[in-house]
Image (cartoon, helix red, strand yellow):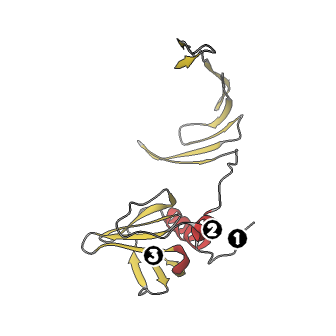
Amino acid sequence: MVQLDSIGAVGTTMGLRFNKSFKVAPGVRLRVGSKSSSISVGGKAGRVTLNSKGRRTTTARLAPGISYTTSTSGTTKNRAAPARAGRDAPPLARNEPLGPEIAPRRSIVGGWVAADLRGVVVHRQSEGDLRIPLTQITKAELDGKKLTLAATGHDTLDLRLTTFLSSRDLRFVETLAKAARLAPSPD
């Protein structure tokens, strides 16, 4: 890290950090660090970790070398909700790259579907990209692996998801519906 002092001279500073882990009981570990601390409960099959900043991480071992991890943040950030940002965001340009995604990208037969603050992008290798602004979306439904999107001025799209996790598929549709104001907001 390089730092300028009050007279404009360049100086260097070094950060000192520490991290120590203790076994409290069988299956329970306490970690103390310079910025945060955490406690973990569990073993090889699964583990739950809570840290001093409010983050909770759950890890489940599915098979040797394969695990599934979820994490929830304890801090809230001041940022616009996707529903409001989607209405106020500028429209999608024809070849503009996808912005920060509001829903996880999902694989479909022959391509993928994703959503950013401005709209939905359906990418098909054979046809190119189809961009639908959030303000035009009238329907977003998931029936098994069949994703149905309807929008004013567009034909109804019936897409077949090829993804592995149904929970992420459902989260994609819920986030998209909330951003397009199709579902009531919990606020």
- Does the residue at mark 1 contact the one at mark 3 (Cβ under 8 Å)? no
Q: Residue furthest front?
A: 7
- Does the residue at mark 2 contact the one at mark 1 (Cβ under 8 Å)? yes
**Callout 2, which amino acid?**
Ala
Residue 61 percent across, percent down from the top left:
50, 45
**Cα separation between marks 2 and 3:** 15 Å
Q: Earlier in the sequence, mark 2 or mark 3?
A: 2
The residue tagged 2 is 83
Residue 16 percent across, percent down from the top left:
59, 15
Residue at 64% from the left image edge and 15% from the top image edge: 6
Q: Residue furthest right?
A: 187
Residue at 65% from the left image edge and 76% from the top image edge: 183
Of the pair 152 and 126, the residue shown nearer to us: 152
Q: Is residue 184 left or right of residue 153?
A: right
**Callout 1, which amino acid?**
Ser
Residue 76 percent across, percent down from the top left:
70, 48
**Cα separation between marks 2 and 1:** 8 Å
**Cα separation between marks 1 and 3:** 21 Å
Residue at 57% from the left image edge and 15% from the top image edge: 8
Q: Secondary structure at mark 3?
A: strand
The residue tagged 3 is 132
Q: Quadrant of the C terminus?
A: bottom right
Report the label total: 3
The residue tagged 1 is 185
Is residue 145 at all visible to an observer of this figure? no
Q: Residues within 10 Å of mark 2 (few under 14, many from 20)?
A: many
